[in-house]
Image: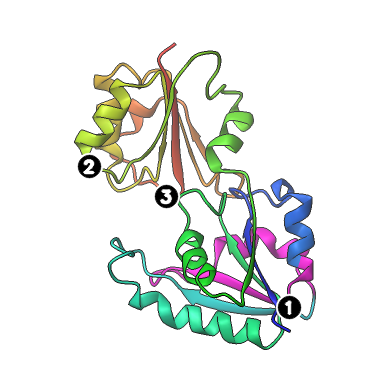
């Protein structure tokens, strides 16, 4: 009998923000898949989940390239898929850990699509708290209320696309603010959204950083896990 594949959101950083369901799934797993990029050692998601791991858990690190155009060319992912399928067909329960929520800007989405196409694989996805939700509670910043319109924007998007979203929104969440942080801050300034913005890097992790005057911090390097919350009022 095949094992079950769990996609588990571990939240933004604080291990206490994992759901009870996520913890149960981690403890039911025989194997944990810990995703990482080519450039970094270790796995942030694994570090968050570590307090809940069984002593005899098998940990498998898989490299997932940060590439666009997955739908056109999934070849870089096929080897990882085959490794996961072999574990499942050996009767092992496999858990894939991902930061935040599995269905929100996550590597897991691509893994899910590959495995969901297999008729003999049982996939269970367990939601997690996304960074912006944790940040709002952490710093006492209401994200959206009443009739306000919220846009969630990847800072890696083309500038014109970001500008259109900002122009149409009352409030905004900007994710992945790192490489082009200065340009993003300038856009927020131009739209009257910089003064009331808050930026948080590595929310809930030991290196957490909170910036309430983003315009004064242009030119400073930021971690990939950086998010800005802002609103017009």
Residue in the image at 57% along x and 49% along y: 101
User: In the visual, does 182 lie left or right of 29?
Assistant: left
Taking depth in this image into account, of 12 and 160 the one nearest to the observer is 160
Residue most extreme to the top: 233
Which label's residue is closer to the chain start, 2 or 1?
1
Residue in the image at 45% along x and 64% along y: 110
Q: Is residue 88 above or below residue 195?
A: below
Q: Given contact means CB atoms under 8 Å apart, are the residues at marks 2 and 1 in contact?
A: no
Q: How far across and down, in percent of the image, does residue 92 sit?
A: 71, 81
Q: In the rendered image, which quarter contains the C terminus? A: top left
Secondary structure found at label 1: loop
Residue most extreme to the left: 160
- Magenta span: 27-54
Q: For residue 158, which numbered disc appears in the image?
A: 2
The residue pinned by badge 1 equals 30
Between marks 3 and 2 in the image, the one whose residue lies nearer the viewer: 2
Between marks 1 and 3 in the image, the one whose residue lies nearer the viewer: 1
Secondary structure found at label 3: loop
Mark 3 Cα within 10 Å, few/some/many (few <14, many 20+)? some
Which label's residue is closer to the chain start, 1 or 3?
1
């Amino acid at each position: 009998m095949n094992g079950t594949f769990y996609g588990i959101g571990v939240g933004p950083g604080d291990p206490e923000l994992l759901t009870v369901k996520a913890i149960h799934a981690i403890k039911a797993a025989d194997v944990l898949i810990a995703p990482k990029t080519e450039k970094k050692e270790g796995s942030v998601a694994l570090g968050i989940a570590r307090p809940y791991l069984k002593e005899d858990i098998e940990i498998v690190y898989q490299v997932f390239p940060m590439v666009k155009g997955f739908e056109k060319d999934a070849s870089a992912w096929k080897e990882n898929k085959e490794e996961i399928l072999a574990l499942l067909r050996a009767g092992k329960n496999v858990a894939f850990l991902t930061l935040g929520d599995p269905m929100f800007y996550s590597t897991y989405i691509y893994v899910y699509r590959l495995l969901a196409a297999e008729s003999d694989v049982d996939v269970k996805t367990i939601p997690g708290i996304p960074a912006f939700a944790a940040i709002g509670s952490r710093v006492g910043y209401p994200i959206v209320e009443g009739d306000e319109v919220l846009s969630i924007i990847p800072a890696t998007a083309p500038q014109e696309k970001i500008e259109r979203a900002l122009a149409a929104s009352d409030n905004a969440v900007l994710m992945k603010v790192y490489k082009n942080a200065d340009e993003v801050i300038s856009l927020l300034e131009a739209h009257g959204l910089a003064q009331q913005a808050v930026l948080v890097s590595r929310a809930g992790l030991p290196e957490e950083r909170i910036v309430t005057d983003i315009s004064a911090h242009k030119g400073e390097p930021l971690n990939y896990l950086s998010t800005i919350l802002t609103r017009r009022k």
